[in-house]
């Protein structure tokens, strides 16, 4: 892992908005954990929230664990398999019918094409 990947995935950091590889990336496929390759999100659940980070309204097979964030206000999301930090989940914003926004650091995931 690079020092920046460690800072975000292990140290629970955040990449700067609008800088991540997958912010405006919409190819078909699956997004997996960069640390352990566990499938986390399908491209069908990705949407443009305008937040500057990749946003998804659903996770794959409960592979994303939700935990109270250390700040006491937000809900952190981590890979259920390895505990790698992914970002945060927000609910009730009305972006999609599922009313969830999994806000993910691009550096925490890797995309695998369907083709």
Image (cartoon, rainbow, N blue to C red):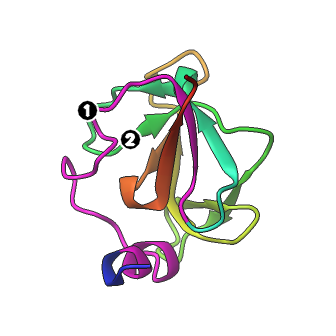
- Residue at horizontal 30 percent and vertical 40 percent from the top: 23
Compared to residue 40, the image places residue 81 above or below, namely below
Image coordinates of residue 70 in percent, x first then y, are 52, 77
Q: Can you tell which of label 1 and label 2 is closer to the viewer? A: 2
Residue at the right extreme of this rendering: 61
Image coordinates of residue 112 in percent, x first then y, are 54, 39
Image coordinates of residue 24 in percent, x first then y, are 27, 32
| Horizontal arrangement in the rendering, residue 47 relative to residue 56 (left or right) | left
- Residue at horizontal 39 percent and vertical 60 percent from the top: 107
> In what quadrant of the picture does the N terminus appear?
bottom left
Asked if the residues shown at circle 1 and circle 2 are in contact, with their CB atoms under 8 angstroms apart, the answer is no
Report helix, strand or loop for mark 1: loop
Compared to residue 74, the image places residue 39 above or below, namely above
The number of callouts visible is 2
Image coordinates of residue 35 in percent, x first then y, are 58, 68
Q: Identify the residue under disc 1.
A: 50
- Residue at horizontal 51 percent and vertical 60 percent from the top: 86
Report helix, strand or loop for mark 2: loop
Q: Which mark is residue 30?
A: none
Kindly indicate the quadrant of the structure image that contains residue 84. bottom right
Give the CA distance from mark 1 to mark 2.
9 Å
Compared to residue 11, the image places residue 51 above or below, namely above
Magenta-span inclusion, residue 40: no
10 Å crowding of disc 2: few (<14), some (14-19), many (20+)? many
Residue 101 shows in the view: no
In the image, the segment drawn in magenta is 5-34
Compared to residue 26, the image places residue 107 above or below, namely below
10 Å crowding of disc 1: few (<14), some (14-19), many (20+)? few
Q: Identify the residue under disc 2.
A: 54
Q: In this rendered view, identify the residue nearer to me: 21 or 62.
A: 21
| Horizontal arrangement in the rendering, residue 52 relative to residue 34 (left or right) | left
Residue at the top extreme of this rendering: 97
């Amino acid at each position: 892992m690079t020092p920046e990947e460690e800072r975000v995935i292990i140290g629970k950091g955040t990449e700067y908005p609008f800088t991540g590889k997958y912010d405006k990336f919409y190819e078909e496929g699956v997004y997996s954990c960069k640390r352990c390759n566990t499938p986390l999100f399908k491209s069908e659940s990705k949407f443009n929230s305008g937040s500057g980070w990749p946003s998804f309204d659903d996770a794959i097979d409960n592979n994303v664990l939700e935990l109270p964030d250390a700040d006491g206000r937000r809900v952190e999301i981590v890979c259920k398999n390895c505990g790698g930090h992914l970002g945060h989940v927000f609910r009730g914003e009305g972006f999609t019918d599922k009313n969830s926004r999994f806000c993910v650091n691009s550096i925490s995931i890797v995309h695998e094409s369907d083709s």
